[in-house]
Structure formats: structure tokens, C-alpha cells
Image (tube, rainbow, N blue to C red):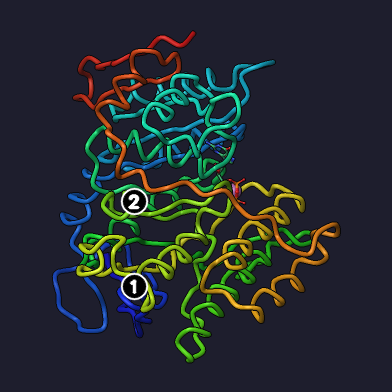
Amino acid sequence: MLVEMARDTEVFGSVKIHELQRVLKFDSGDFENPRVCNVPFESIRDVLKRMAIIIPVKNENMHLLDGVLRAIPFHCSVILVSNSDRDTHDVYKIETDAVTNIHELTQQEILCIHQKDPALGDAFHKAGYDSILDKKGLVRDGKSEGMIAGMMLAKSIGKDFMGFIDADNYIPGSVREYILDFAGGLCMSKSSYSMVRLHWKYKPKVVEDKFYFKKWGRVSETTNKFLNLLLSEHTGFETGVIVTGNSGEHALTTKLADIMTYSSGYSVEPYHYVYLFENFGPDAENTVNPDAVTAGVEVFQIETLNPHLHEEKGRKHIRRMLAGSLSTVYYSKLSNDGIREKIVEEIKDLQKSCRKPKENARMPPIGGIDVGKFMKGLQKDSKTYLRLKQGEIGGEAKHEKSSLH
Ligand code: GDP
Ligand code: CO
């Protein structure tokens, strides 16, 4: 893969944020050019083998999920965390049927769990991780909550890297690219604490009867503006380095995933930045993780070649995402009155009843959870956990538990 070199890197304490890098070509010849990063396919494949792709899903169109599942490179393991309805129609059953079918045809390793499985809530409770639970002791609704459950499963199968892909993507070929971009970015990193975030070249919309290749949406533009402001006010130098504040499609090393704190629902992605600034910025007390401070945390932002086309979820969804995103900056200890006032101004048309954005719930790092114990409890009691192991094509599938009741 050929990726443009980052022209500049913003250094904030021990966090390095590389400027946007374009994918120049998916494959490459054997040559040296100081202006480009040439990542050999063998290196990409080595990363894919050590990576789990986590798909959070909630009642998405099955055609889209099916395309996404098929597009994931064979060497990755797939982890589906579903919060889909099970009452009137058991959507989870339809999802796991699709997964089982793909596994039978391809023998790719696939794990599934339902977010509302009481055994999952119980496993988190026994691990002392109650901040992910609702009053009934079940894992709360929310994309972030599903992602954390997925991370635990990725750790249980010993993965070193985790990537996240949404289930509502219309173009399977773009999903495949995103995962190769994750691997390419991770190969470029010099630190074992690193993250790759994707930025689409375009997000096409239909305007009247034509495609319009839009570059920015209100949520991403505004979130990036405020994350950059937070950074600029602390360094004294204006920056626009952050272009991936809401990047749902991102990947990170398990070592970094283990030490991060997570914000709930859709605020999870912008909070990654806020967390890194607060804990690894120049004013951080260097006690959070001395190893990561020494190694440095690297953030890569890659511009995809493919456009991004996903389900439009409506204005209410956009409003919720924007308020959740800006709340991460509003409540940051690095924020100031000027930034907070600007945020209130930005969202005043969204939240008529309240001047301040609602504070997001936060969930502590998962690194302290004993994965062995967590999985033992989960496997014993779960009625939704399914692990279809990788096997030889044509060989017998190795099911760990395949009965869904
Ligand atoms: P957007 O693309 O960022 O506007 O947000 P989406 O609504 O498309 O959500 C991103 C992904 O998260 C999709 O695959 C959703 O189905 C999934 N998702 C949303 N809410 C939840 C949830 O509560 N739990 C899980 N597991 N997935 C969710
Ligand atoms: Co979407």
C-alpha cells in the first residue's frame, strides 16, 4: 500500500497527531521514495492476522450487514456486538444465522454476543465494571457500550489490534479498504500505543436527482473545530490538524485500548482525543501510564480512496451526536469559559430547555479486568455468545457454542 507521508505532526505532550495522509494506491511496487510510505502487503497481512474487527450493530438492514461481513479480510477475526430487537422479531437470530452461513462458506473466525445478554452484564458486574450497566444490571444501550463488550471479546482471543466498522455501510468494497487502511496505519506507527482514524474523501448525498459529493457534515465539522480549539488554546498556536473527531471507523492497539477511558454512546470517538489530551498532554501528571508516556501515543488520520455511503438516520440522530460530541469538550478539564460559551452558542438551537450540554457517562479502562475470569462466567451462563473458530475451507467448523435459545 502506498500512503502519503504526513506533512506535519502536532506534538502535544506525549501525543503525536499526524496530519491527514492520503492513500495513494492500495498496492505498490518494491521501491523507495522519501515522500511516500510504502507498506508491503506481507506487513499488512501480519497485522490483519493479529486484528479483530468489531461491528456494533442495532437493527440495521440485513443486506448492508451481510455485505459488511463478507467484505472483511479473511485473516481478521470478526466480532459482532448486537443491540438489535429480540421481542417482536428476533433480529439477533437473523443476524447470527447470516454469520453462521458466512462462517460455513468461508471458515472465517466470527464471534457474536447480544448486548442485553444478562450473562454479559453479570460478567461486567463481577469484574467490578458496573459503570457500563443500567439499573437492571444489563449493559446499557449505546454504541460505546457495545464497543467495550467487543473489546473484551477481542482480548479473549488474544488480539493485538482492534478495528471498528459500522454495520450500515452500502459499499462492501469500501469496508475492505477501511480495514487495509487500518493495517497500513498501524504498520507506520513507531509506538505500541497507537490509533488510526479514517476520514472519507467524500460522503455522497442525493440532492434532487444528482449525487453531490459532500466533504463535510455539520457534526464532523463542528466537532473538529472544537477539538482543534481545545488544542490551539493550550499551545498558543492555531491548528486544524484534527479532521477525524467523529471517526466511527478507527483502529487501535490493544495496549492503547486497555488504558483509555471511554465516553458513552456516540461521544466515544471525540472523547478519545479529549482523553489523550488530558492524560498525555503537557500538563498531565505522568502517572496514568508511564510506559505509554515514554513510548508516546501516535494518532494517524488517513483519507480513504473510497467514498462513504451509509444509512441516513435523520435529524434527531444528528442533534444527539453533535450534543454528545461537544459535551466531551465542554466538560474537559482543559476547557475554559470562552470555549464553553462558544459551545452553548453552537448548540442553543438543539437544546432549547437547557444551556449546558448533558454530561456523558464515562467508563474506566478495561485493562484491569481479568479476561479469563470474565469469559469463564460469560461462557457458562450466556445464551447468546457464539464463537465460530477459523478452520480450513471445507473442514469441519469448530463451534464453541452454537445454540441460540
Ligand atoms: P453514524 O454512522 O455515526 O451516524 O451512526 P450509526 O447510527 O450508523 O451507528 C454506528 C453503528 O453503531 C451502526 O452499525 C449502528 O447499528 C451501531 N449502533 C448504534 N447504537 C448501538 C447500540 O446501542 N449498540 C450496538 N451494539 N450498536 C449500536
Ligand atoms: Co452510520
Q: Please give the label number shown on residue 15.
A: 1
Q: Of label 1 and label 2, which has the lower sequence position?
A: 1
Residue 18 in the image, given as x and y percentages of width and height: 36, 76
* Residue at (49% x, 8% y) in the render: 405
In the rendered structure, the answer to whether residue 353 lies left or right of residue 272 reads right
Q: Nearer the viewer, residue 209 or 235?
A: 235
Residue 52 in the image, given as x and y percentages of width and height: 31, 41
* Residue at (28% x, 32% y) in the render: 371
Secondary structure, mark 2, is helix
In the rendered structure, the answer to whether residue 347 lies left or right of residue 8 reads right
Label 2 crowd (10 A; few <14 / some 14-19 / many >=20): many
Q: Quadrant of residue 49?
A: top left
Q: Please give the label number shown on residue 99.
A: none
Secondary structure, mark 1, is strand
Q: Nearer the viewer, residue 296 or 383?
A: 296
Q: Which residue is mark 2?
A: 257
* Quadrant location of the N terminus in the rendered image: bottom left
Q: Nearer the viewer, residue 26 or 328?
A: 328
Label 1 crowd (10 A; few <14 / some 14-19 / many >=20): many
Residue 315 in the image, given as x and y percentages of width and height: 77, 53
Name above or below for residue 346 compared with residue 40.
below
Q: Amino acid at mark 2?
A: Ala
Name above or below for residue 382 compared with residue 362.
above
| Cα–Cα gap, marks 1 and 2 | 15 Å
Q: Amino acid at mark 1?
A: Val
